[in-house]
Amino acid sequence: MRNNLFILSGPSGSGKNTVYNGVAALIPEIEQTVSATTRAPREGETDGVDYYFLSVKEFEKRIRDDAFVEFVKYGDNYYGTLRSEIRRLNEAGKIVVLIIEVRGALNVKRVFPEAESIFILPPSIDVLRERILGRGQNTVEETEKRLRIAEQEMLEKEKYDHRVINDKLEDCVNEVADIIRKGVCKE
């Protein structure tokens, strides 16, 4: 049976989205699920494209309705993957990639054990700190909190099918693309 469900995960600042964008340039059949969140849209983000932006009340209603394959509360906001997103992409014949945080990824593996999970690691915690600070979106306190969370998340890496260090972006992208190609071809 063809596997078409992959999980790309890792701590904040590991480069998950950048790696995905590189892989998407190599494998045009892949498509990322659009996650739902209760956080406010950032400048330039579009509802239904970047995220489905939901109120807390609507998100919690969908939790009760079992509409999510996974969801977490990260900081003050909910994030989750709607079952309907996976179904929509499967029906379109896409290779489905979920770019999600660690707790959510482990939940997806429980629901879809056939999904291949890929953990993106930073070369070091110092590089991770530089990447997070370089975004210019977080205060020093928020950065330190994210780093504490990242250290805890990295303890979960052995639960993933694959672990890839994002030191040289091109090498990381090629390694992840190879994992997806081989996973799709598995019988």
Image (cartoon, rainbow, N blue to C red):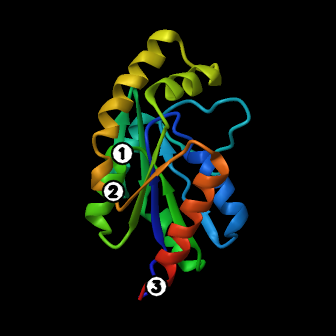
Element on which disc 1 rests: helix
Residue 32 visible in this rendered orientation of the protein: no
Horizontal relation, residue 152 to residue 5: left or right? left
Horizontal relation, residue 43 to residue 160: left or right? right
Q: Residue at x 32, y 68 (%)?
A: 112
Decide: is 14 above or below 177: above
Crowding around mark 1 (Cα neighbors within 10 Å: few <14, some 14 to 19, many 20+) is: many
Where's residue 43, x and y in %? 71, 29
Horizontal relation, residue 18 to residue 155: left or right? right
Q: Residue at x 45, y 78 (%)?
A: 3
Dot 1 or dot 2: first in sequence order is: 1
* Numbered circle sitting on residue 2: 3
Dot 3 or dot 2: first in sequence order is: 3
Where's residue 135, x and y in %? 63, 25
Q: Amino acid at mark 2?
A: Tyr
Residue that label 1 marks:
102
Where's residue 4, x and y in %? 49, 75
Element on which disc 2 rests: loop
Residue that label 2 marks:
160
Dot 3 or dot 1: first in sequence order is: 3
